[in-house]
Each structure stands twice: as C-alpha cells, then as structure tokens.
Amino acid sequence: YLVPLLAGDAELIPHLRPENTPLYKTAVELFETMCAADKYYELAVCGILNNLFFQLLSEGRIRKSEKNLRGHKKKIVASLISWIEKNYTEKITLADLSAQSGFNEKYLCRVFREFTGQPPTEYINRLRVERAAFEMSTNRRSVTDAAYESGFNELSHFSRTFKKYKGVSPREFKQYISRE
C-alpha cells in the first residue's frame, strides 16, 4: 500500500481540515506522540501511522499520480496498437478495442488520439492502406486481393480510403508501380 506512495507513483490529496474527523484526530495524535517522545514512542508512532494510512486509503486521499496514469495509458495504447497490427485483417470495432483496453469507447478515442495523433479508426484504415500498398507493390497482388487481404470488406470503401491517404486511386497506384 505504501510502496506506490514512496516510489512517487501515487500522491496524497492535500487539504486536511481541522474538523473533528477521524483523519484529523489521528494526525494530531501522531504529532503529539512524536513531540512527547516518551519511552518506546516509536512503536506508538508506527501504530498511529498504520491507522493514518488506513484512513487515507479508505477515504480515497491517496491516488495514482498523473505521471503514473500517463504511463499506464501509454502501455494500454501500445498494447492496443500491437493487437491492431495482429488483427487488422479482421473486422475491428470500437467495442472490440474498448474490450481490449478496458476503457469506454469515448475515453478510448481520446486517449488513443493523445498518443497517436489520430483516432483508432483512422489508425486502422491507414495501416490497412499501407499493407494493401505493400502487397500490391511487393507481392504484386491485384487491387481486389490487396483490399480484402488488408481487411477491407468493400472495394468502394477501399478505393476512397486509399485515395484519401495515398493521393491516388488503388488502380493508379498499381499502374504506377507496374511501370517501375
């Protein structure tokens, strides 16, 4: 419980008010015990600290630090990208990505964009277009085969998406690489 706090991965939520709360009373007891420095006071301090941390945790006054949350989100996005690259040929929905990440769909899109600069659907479409272009140029696949092998289900959608990212239609791209 204390390791994240000591390691800097968690932080205390400030603002201890001098109200008659159990947390405040425990903090006062801690300081009074430390100031008195009676015989064996160290043992009493340990007991009071345990109680203090119990109260801090149970009241939600210790939270993961923003640095740690960003690192956690970064790991989730990296994991999603890896999953997408393994499954890009299949139908991938936001619900699938949400299930993979544990984030709701709206939050997932925001976090994904934060780290990649684009929403997940755009990332997937770009990846599919790049893979289709690779298949057409390297393995000499037909436009249709490259489209279906890269995860597109409709040729019209593939053509529009391909032109959006490559600036030319798949057919024009195929003709251009055939000349080389």
Image (tube, rainbow, N blue to C red):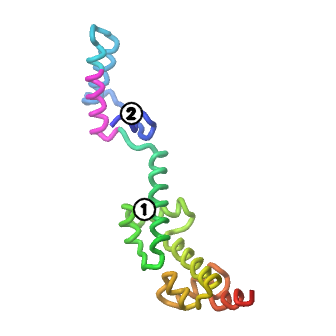
Q: Main secondary structure of the magenta part?
A: helix
Q: Is residue 104 above or below residue 49?
A: below
Question: Badge 2 local density, few (<14 within 10 Å), some, or many (20+)?
Answer: few
Horizontally, residue 81 falls left or right of residue 25, namely right
At mark 1, the secondary structure is helix
Amino acid type of the residue tagged 1 in the rendering: Tyr
Task: Find disc 1 in the rendering and name its residue.
Answer: 107
Residue 60: image tag: none
Q: Quadrant of the N terminus?
A: top left
Asked whether residue 142 appears in the rendered view, the answer is yes
Q: Residue farthest to the front?
A: 139
Residue 149 in percent (x, y) is at 50, 84
**What residue range appears in magenta?**
46-61
Residue 154 is left or right of residue 170, and the answer is: left
Q: Residues within 10 Å of mark 1 (few under 14, many from 20)?
A: few
The correct choice, above or below, for 37 with respect to 49 in the image is: above
Q: On the image, which quarter does residue 9 sit in? A: top left
Q: Is residue 170 magenta?
A: no
**Residue in the image at 41% along x and 68% along y:** 97
- The image shows residue 135 at horizontal and vertical percentages of 59, 82
For the residues carrying marks 1 and 2, which lies nearer the camera in this image? 1
Please report the residue visible at 67 percent of the width from the left and 82 percent of the height from the top: 167
Q: Residue tagged by mark 2?
A: 15
Q: Is residue 53 magenta?
A: yes
Residue found at x 32% / y 41%? 60
Q: Dot 2: what SS? A: loop
Q: Residue at image x 57%, y 64%?
A: 117
1 or 2: tag closer to the N-terminus: 2
In terms of depth relative to the viewer, which is nearer, 58 or 40? 40
Asked whether, in this view, residue 58 is left or right of residue 123, the answer is: left
Outermost residue toward the top?
39
Relative image position of residue 73 (x, y in whole percent)? 46, 55
